[in-house]
Amino acid sequence: MSDAGPKTAVILALFLAVTLFLAGCGGDDVAPDQAEVEVGRETVEGMSREHADDSAEPSPATDAAPAQEVISDPRMPYTEAEDELVYGYFAAPADVFEPLPAIIVIHEWWGLNDNVRTMADRLAGEGYMVLAVDLYGGKTATSPEGARQLMLNVVEDPEPAKANIRDAYRFLETAGAPSIASLGWCFGGGWSLTAAQLLPDQLDASVIYYGQVTSDEDKLRPLEVPILGLFAADDTGITVESVEAFRAALERLRKDHEIHIYPGVGHAFANPSGRNYDASAAEDAWSKTLDFLARHLSSDASGDG
């Protein structure tokens, strides 16, 4: 990643101005849905099992350099919470002179660490503006127990995170992005689906890497967002049964979706952090991700977003 120099200072200054304009955005206090909280707690326990012997060290997903030079701002303010600015990680191609399609990247259960920033750079290298959001309030974990507690904090009180996602979308929209997708792994994969539910006729695509899903048709019916789901056959936290129920609900509702379940691999097979990486599955999933994003974020993609 490279920091912005004089050539790109104007671009980042524009984003800063947009952010300050949006600083007042935020959600009202809303009581959490207790059924949703219970499902979230079960997912936390499933993630904890899957990551019990894992670490936050970089995985081979972070080895590849971006396809082109990118610029970045590691502390891009894009909203505020409790009168404090919330900072994400912004990246874009170094030669960008006008708004590009954008991706909201949502971190795995470890938090917005350097490994997620590296993946944001890889996506930016494919020709996108990327905002990696922070749903943990500036905290990251280095142990499974620390990650479990951070994830549980969001599960117990999800409304601030929902406001965070909405404001990230508004930030990129106001900055001129012609189309916007969400993408996340693990914890962030579930939140990528939540982003689609929060923005059912605004978001242009949603990529879910083995995140919590639902078969509740009432929650899925409003979606007008194409879905790409990438899951693991040996995942005990996000089970194949739950994924197949999700797929069946999307099929009944005739939603635009692609679901892939990789045999012989477990949870976090493509995570930027951790020891569960599987090169074959991860590389195939990455290829499918780039193809899906290109189809749905291109200037001639159908739909107005």
Image (cartoon, rainbow, N blue to C red):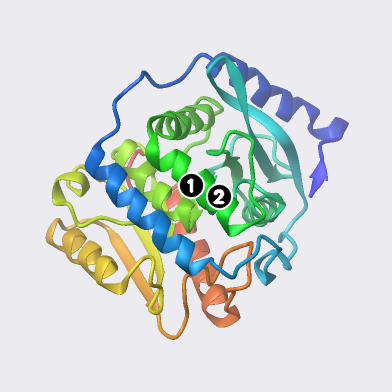
Of helix, strand and loop, which one carries label 2? loop
Compared to residue 71, the image places residue 231 above or below, namely: below
In space, the residues marked 1 and 2 are separated at their CA atoms by 11 Å
Compared to residue 159, the image places residue 43 above or below, namely: below
Mark identifier at residue 151: 1
User: Pointer 1 and pointer 2: residues touching (CB < 8 Å)?
Assistant: no
Quadrant (top left/top right/bottom left/bottom right) for the C terminus: top left
Three-letter code for the amino acid on which mark 2 is drawn: His
* Mark with earlier residue (1, 2): 2
In the rendered view, does 207 fall on the left or right side of 172? left
Compared to residue 106, the image places residue 279 above or below, namely: below
Q: Position of residue 299 (x, y in %)?
A: 47, 46
Mark 2 residue crowding within 10 angstroms, few (<14) / some (14–19) / many (20+): many
- Residue that protrudes farthest toward the bottom in the picture: 264
- Residue that protrudes farthest toward the front in the picture: 145
On the question of residue 238 being in view, the answer is yes
Q: Measuring 53% from the left and 38% from the top, which residue is drawn there?
A: 135
On the question of residue 298 being in view, the answer is no
Mark identifier at residue 62: none
In the rendered view, does 128 fall on the left or right side of 299? right
Q: Position of residue 174 (x, y in %)?
A: 51, 24
Q: Measuring 59% from the left and 70% from the top, which residue is drawn there?
A: 53
| Labels 1, 2: front one | 1
Per the image, the residue denoted by label 2 is 107
Q: Measuring 53% from the left and 72% from the top, which residue is drawn there?
A: 269
In the rendered view, does 61 fall on the left or right side of 10? left
Q: Please name whichever residue, 27 or 23, is drawn nearer the observer in this view of the structure.
A: 27
Of helix, strand and loop, which one carries label 1? helix
Q: Position of residue 87 (x, y in %)?
A: 64, 31
Q: Quadrant of residue 199?
A: top left
Mark 1 residue crowding within 10 angstroms, few (<14) / some (14–19) / many (20+): many
Three-letter code for the amino acid on which mark 1 is drawn: Met
